[in-house]
């Protein structure tokens, strides 16, 4: 038995960028670094699962005042 993935289970880098509030290029970089679980490159396009969460940005530090 073969189960097909529904194409609505995935978003493009541009759609993911809008959802996460970051640039398309940043999403592409995160995908290429392997920091987005389940992201796959199909041809020249990254596809990101709808369930993928935005990775933590180690450049930002939380400061308590």
Image (cartoon, rainbow, N blue to C red):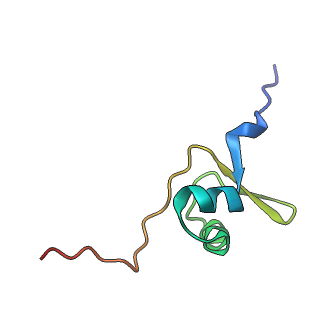
Residue 41 or 28: which is nearer the viewer? Answer: 28
Residue 14 or 57: which is nearer the viewer? Answer: 14
Residue situated furthest top in the rendering:
1
The spot of residue 35 in percent (x, y) is 55, 64
Taking 12 as reference, is 21 above or below it? below
Residue situated furthest bottom in the rendering:
59
The spot of residue 4 in percent (x, y) is 80, 30
The residue positioned 58% from the left and 59% from the top of the image is 36
Residue 38 or 18: which is nearer the viewer? Answer: 18
Judged left or right of residue 42, residue 19 is: left
To which quarter of the image does residue 17 belong? Answer: bottom right
The residue positioned 21% from the left and 76% from the top of the image is 63
Residue situated furthest left in the rendering:
65
The residue positioned 53% from the left and 64% from the top of the image is 21
Judged left or right of residue 15, residue 2 is: right
Question: Where the N terminus falls, by quadrant?
Answer: top right
Taking 41 as reference, is 60 above or below it? below
Question: Where the C terminus falls, by quadrant?
Answer: bottom left
The residue positioned 56% from the left and 50% from the top of the image is 52
Judged left or right of residue 28, residue 52 is: left
Taking 43 as reference, is 60 above or below it? below
Taking 50 as reference, is 4 above or below it? above
To which quarter of the image does residue 58 belong? Answer: bottom left
The spot of residue 10 in percent (x, y) is 70, 45
Residue situated furthest right in the rendering:
43
Judged left or right of residue 49, residue 45 is: right
Count the marks.
Answer: 0
């Amino acid at each position: 038995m073969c189960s097909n993935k529904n194409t609505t289970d995935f978003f493009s880098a541009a759609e993911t960028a809008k959802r996460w509030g970051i640039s398309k290029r940043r999403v592409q970089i995160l995908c290429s670094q392997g920091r987005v679980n389940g992201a796959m490159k199909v041809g020249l396009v990254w596809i990101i699962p709808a369930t993928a969460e935005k990775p933590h940005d180690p450049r930002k530090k939380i400061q308590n005042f």
